[in-house]
Image (tube, grey):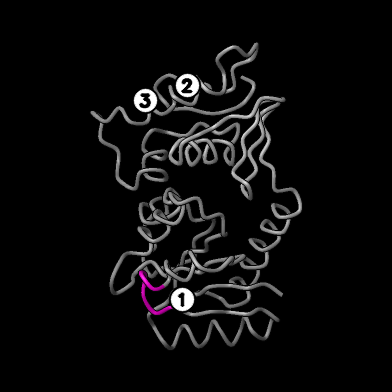
Amino acid sequence: MAKLLLVEDDARIASFVVRGLEAEGHVIDVAGAGLAGMAMARQSDYALVILDRMLPDIDGVEVCRQLRSEGHGSRVLMLTARDALGDKVGGLNAGADDYMTKPFSFDEFVARVEALLRRSELQRLDPLLRVADLTLDPGTRQVRRGARSIELTRKEYTLLRYLMENAGTVLSRSQILSNNWGYGFDPGTKVVDVYIRYLRKKIDDGEAIPLIQTVRGAGYSIGEG
């Protein structure tokens, strides 16, 4: 049994989803708008947020982006009637873990929910994010490199967590901006480079093996190179 949050303004779809997931043994809270959903997500620890993209007050992508920028680690399954590739990429870049297009098979929907819940359980059992001798504890927000404790600002922490959750993957500046600052890529914006420099100074300076890698023309990644 898991505690889930459904953010959906269509009462018919919400009722259908709630009945089906309750039959699977889950507990579901429901919000009918984006701002209400954000408030509920901030107040409770949900294993999964099922988030409609088209909401009456604020777009579901922006809800996801804001929650991720605040460090919320709940899995997010985004639902939408828009099936264009660009819409899916936008949702995933905002921090969603999976994306389903309406109408959908309920059996497939349940299978995706259960897959995301298994990932959440694995993260709960081993909460530390690790890259070489660098660790980040999402529960306490403590960051260490070997025996050394590292103090980070909120934005530095959010950026490092995003890099470590995607360790070994090259993340573009556009992806990093969308996940951490909530706006699209501006070629003149240097904020990503500035914060990468801040992180390097705190994490890699004085270490034999640098972990934050620049991939020329593509973006940044974290790993042993």
- Few, some or many residues within 10 Å of mark 2 (<14, 14–19, 20+): few
In this rendering, the label closer to the viewer, 2 or 1: 2
Q: Secondary structure at mark 3?
A: helix
State the quadrant of the N terminus: bottom right
In front of the other: 155 or 164:
155
Residues shaded magenta: 31-36
Q: Earlier in the sequence, mark 2 or mark 1?
A: 1
Residue 10 percent across, percent down from the top left: 39, 83
In this rendering, the label closer to the viewer, 3 or 2: 3
Q: Is residue 159 left or right of residue 204?
A: left
Q: Earlier in the sequence, mark 3 or mark 2?
A: 3
Could you give the CA–CA distance between mark 1 and mark 3, rounded to whole angstroms? 43 Å
Whether tag 3 and tag 2 are in contact, CB under 8 A, the answer is no
In front of the other: 150 or 28:
150
In front of the other: 98 or 159:
159
Could you give the CA–CA distance between mark 3 and mark 2, rounded to whole angstroms? 16 Å
- Residue 215: assigned label: 2
Residue 39 percent across, percent down from the top left: 42, 69
- Residue 103: assigned label: 1
Q: Residue at x 44, y 78 (%)?
A: 31
Q: Is residue 207 above or below residue 16?
A: above
Kind of residue at disc 2: Val
Q: Residue at x 52, y 21 (%)?
A: 213
Label 3, on which residue? Answer: 194
